[in-house]
Amino acid sequence: MTVKVEEVSMKEGSTFHISENTRTVLERRYLKKDTEGALQETPAELFRRVATHIAEAEGLYEEGLESSEVAEAFYRLMTDFTFLPNSPTLMNAGNKLGQLAACFVLPVEDSLDGIFDAVKNAAVIHKSGGGTGFSFSRLRAKNSRVGTTGGVASGPVSFMKIFNTATEQVKQGGTRRGANMAILRVDHPDILEFIACKADNAALNNFNISVGVTDAFMRAVRDGGTYELIDPRDGKALESLNAQEVYETLIHQAWFNGDPGIIFLDRINRDNPTPGIGEIESTNPCGEQPLLPMEACNLGSINLSKCVTTAGNKTRVDFEALKEAVWLAVRFLDDTLEMSQYPLAEIDAMVKGNRKIGLGVMGFADLLFMMGVPYNSEDAVALAEKVMGFVQAEAHHASRHLAVTRGVFPNIGQSVFDGDAEKAYRNATCTTIAPTGTLSILAGCSSGIEPVFALSYVRRVMDGDELMEGNPIFEAMAKARGFYSEELMARIAKQGSIAHMAEIPEDVRRVFVTAHDISPEWHIRMQAAFQNHTDNAVSKTVNLPREATVDDVRAIYDMAFDLCCKGVTIYRDGSKTGQVLSVSDQGGDKGVSTPLPQVLERPELLEGFTSRVRTGMGQLYVTVTEMEGRPFEVFATIGKSGKSTTAKTEAIGRLISLALRSGVEVDEIINQLKGICGEHAVFQKGGRVLSIPDAIGRVLEKRYMKGDSLSNGKKPEATFLGDLCPDCGGNVTHEEGCVTCHLCGYTKCG
């Protein structure tokens, strides 16, 4: 079923089209609401509000352009969904709050005053819709002496918990929880505690964490040597650690649940445009925006799927349209710097001094689909280099053009561009590949530079019906080639991939690959290709299958370093559901740690059914609630029976519910229940009911096995399911350093 499209009328009489997805996300996350939650603007009014407010900056310069003229150009750029700015701009432009930046880095000084100033400043930023990054590397090590009190320090990890708790209490702009990045240098004395600080998935849930790795450390890893831990108070060496052992500990923890990632600090600082001002020590929450302490950046992304042209059966990149979009987007982002109300005077000064902007792209996977190029191919990597190289060059040209009439960024004298007339830029940086999870839903395109996560998925609507929604490019091609069907789309939604569907032509299967069809080296090569032409950094996640090994993760980290990426994040499918370590000595390697499943929390509202079954102990009522068409809980009650039987029946239901919410497949539960004999078997329609457990198994079998007999060993078709969205119950994806639901727009870092 194709996503519904509707026209939105404008006061001027023009229209633009938005999908049902876009409208849903706009209403939930972006449109102005009153104190009662009632909508106060339409989608058209939102984009008009943003365009008009940002264009007011044009009045500051004598360039011969009217603000209204520029506002109209900005409006068209956004309502065509060719470009969208970061979320705080959409939320706050033209509103009282007025804070438009997404990315901030705050210093954490080694004193109680410095630490709690950072907590306070982070709360203010989170309230305005921004995310914060911190380096905790300046803090003295755990158990160090505190001279003023004679006590001992508690160390960086303990203070991270304070930041995490404060973040939990602050709702960002009424739309999302705050997000943080914590970085600790690999040579900090507390690095091993830091690496393990998110081993429990319930800990530090508002933080992404990354180890700040140095070139010296990586050399020591490869040479099999040691490296020194440095006291942050005086810079003196404290002790030495085996570099390979630390690296392996880091890699194993990342394999276990995705944290920590790696930030290559020396690589980042080689591209620091203003070394005269200071060293970069941290990034924003998703790692794509390295920033100086007290610095912020405004981001935006161009939808590459809008910059194509087709002649006959040949689709190519429309570089003229892309150039026009880049130049207008650079102007938009530079204007945003003037119109944003930054929460701290120090941030305002730093932002206005360096004028960093971060223009990136989204819809890259869609572009590849349209051009018939597999993501995991040399042609795709070459296209990434060509497209991003063009975006980078034109962004710099546009910035230099603005500098002629508006002036260069004030801190250029302390930058690597000082004295170079060809690099007299308006902005210290111009390009960033940022996460676009929610923005890509608005634009109806794939996220950032990520491959698509699925070609088809199921949306459950209010009346309980299920609607199939597919990638529109794949749907159109399937219809044109004659193999489209609702049944096929349903199977794709369950399996998540078409790689092994023989009824789909081989050339189609080769092009329409999803994240888990792509081997890790292609993920890293694609990230490196974009990084080669990006001033700042690249937000991307290397998705791994659940069976990926620790050695696989090491190969990814090594490759990211060798290809000059500025950081790397991995996510092994299902690993975030691990809570504690378990050690298995049955099969495989002894001592291999594997994650135990996490028990899913119950949403407020679930639909279900109740069945009545006659048993030898009385009438049994079995109520089953469902999520996404799968059983979620079982409640069993037995009528007119003794207290012992009632208690046991309730206990069986509770244990089944726990198993279902922990990810145990329903067929396995049925196998365990069916055939259990009790004291009083009874005959009824459908056969003999042996006991209460047997009756519950029969109810589940009738509902979910669809006629397949378990006795012959046949199992239901495998399904491809990830973690569930806490807002709508849909499946979320782990990409771009975030968790994103592509159904409702929910997103979360940490």
Image (cartoon, rainbow, N blue to C red):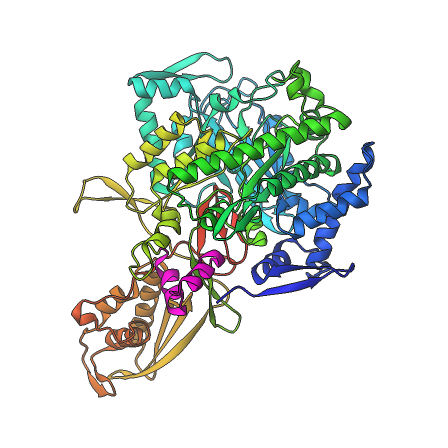
Where does the image place residue 35, in percent across and percent down from the top left? 72, 58
Vertical side of 284 occupied by 633: above or below: below
484 in magenta: yes
Magenta span main SS: helix
229 in magenta: no
Horizontal side, residue 474 vs residue 396: left or right: left
Where does the image place residue 256, in percent across and percent down from the top left? 34, 41
Q: Residue furthest bottom?
A: 684
**Whether residue 508 is visible:** yes
The magenta segment: 471-497
- Front residue of 288/253: it is 288
Horizontal side, residue 278 vs residue 12: left or right: left
Where does the image place residue 114, in percent across and percent down from the top left? 61, 26
* Total count of labels: 0
Where on the picture, by quarter, is residue 547? top left
Where does the image place residue 599, in percent across and percent down from the top left? 38, 56
**Whether residue 117 is visible:** no
At horizontal 75% and vertical 38% (from top left) the residue drawn is 339
Vertical side of 520 occupied by 78: above or below: below
At horizontal 35% and vertical 36% (from top left) the residue drawn is 521
Where on the picture, by quarter, is residue 130? top right
- Front residue of 5/142: it is 5
Horizontal side, residue 412 vs residue 454: left or right: right
Q: Residue furthest front?
A: 312
- Front residue of 587/301: it is 301
At horizontal 68% and vertical 61% (from top left) the residue drawn is 37
Vertical side of 419 occupied by 425: above or below: below
